[in-house]
């Protein structure tokens, strides 16, 4: 079995976002990339796109084969895609990111993982939390992603960055509290307005 690193990435006005997952598969790099691209399409279209605005887009998918003992990339394929959001209104600030948490049979920190989603639409917030409808939509999107990967022969795993251990993912969950990812506003140049104190 080969370990693959999968990335979906995209843009917001003036910034970018990405999500990374790992899998194992007996298939080739080409077939793994095709399966990943199809899974991202199922994840986004008719599911996640409903909770992100049109200025949030998924623009690329990529898959890299990984050396299991070092964690280093061996070879990589990528595809350009065009998956815009369809929600109306404004998006949340760049660093506001909801997450999908992954669970395994391990009851330790090493048995948990997560991905941060791109900024969602302001309209999905209710009293400072994600609305129950938005959480349901994200759960549906995550289910589509995993099902699409399974159909393509990709088994979702957590891959230890330092230990290089492989742990099969057995489930996941989505919380209603919005997280913060500071690096998603690194490229923004802030406009500052001065004032004087008399």
Image (spheres, helix red, strand yellow):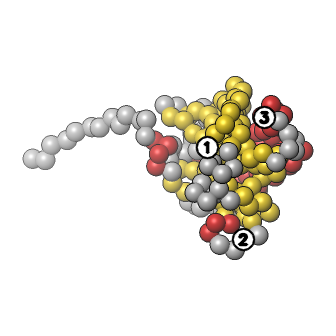
Asked whether disc 2 touches disc 3, contact meaning CB atoms under 8 Å apart, the reply is no
The residues tagged by marks 2 and 3 sit, at their Cα atoms, a distance apart of 29 Å
Q: Earlier in the sequence, mark 3 or mark 1?
A: 3
Which quadrant holds residue 26? top right
Q: Are marks 2 and 1 in contact (CB under 8 Å)?
A: no
- Indicate which disc, 2 or 1, sits on the residue closer to the N terminus: 1
Q: Residue at x 66, y 64 (%)?
A: 112
Relative horizontal placement of residue 142, taking residue 7 as reference (left or right) = right
- Please say whether residue 60 is visible from this viewpoint: yes
Q: Please give the label number shown on residue 72.
A: 1
Which residue is the site of mark 2?
106
- Mark 3 residue element: helix
Q: Mark 3 highlights which residue?
A: 29
- Alpha carbon separation for disc pair 3 and 1: 15 Å
Instruction: Where is residue 170? Give x, y as percent.
Output: 80, 63
Q: Which residue is more in the foreground, 18 or 85?
A: 18
Secondary structure beneath dot 1 equals loop
Is residue 196 shown above or below 101?
above
Label 2 Cα neighbours within 10 Å, binned few <14 / some 14-19 / many ≥20: few
């Amino acid at each position: 079995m080969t370990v693959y690193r999968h990335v979906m990435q995209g843009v917001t006005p003036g910034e970018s976002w990405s999500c990374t997952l790992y899998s194992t598969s007996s298939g080739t790099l080409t077939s793994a990339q095709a399966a990943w691209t199809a899974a991202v399409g199922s994840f986004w279209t008719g599911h996640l796109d409903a909770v992100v605005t049109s200025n949030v887009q998924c623009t690329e998918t990529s898959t890299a084969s990984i050396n299991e003992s070092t964690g280093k990339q061996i070879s990589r394929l990528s595809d350009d895609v065009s998956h815009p959001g369809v929600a109306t209104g404004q998006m949340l600030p760049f660093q506001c990111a909801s997450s999908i948490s992954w669970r395994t049979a391990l009851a330790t920190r090493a048995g948990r993982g997560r991905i941060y989603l791109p900024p969602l639409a302001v309209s999905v917030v209710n009293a400072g939390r994600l609305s129950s409808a938005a959480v349901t939509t994200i759960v549906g999107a995550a289910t589509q992603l995993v099902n699409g990967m399974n159909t393509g022969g990709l088994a979702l795993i957590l891959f230890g960055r330092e230990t290089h251990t492989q742990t099969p993912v057995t489930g996941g969950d989505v919380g209603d509290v919005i997280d913060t990812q500071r690096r998603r506003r690194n490229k923004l140049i802030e406009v500052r307005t001065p004032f004087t104190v008399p």
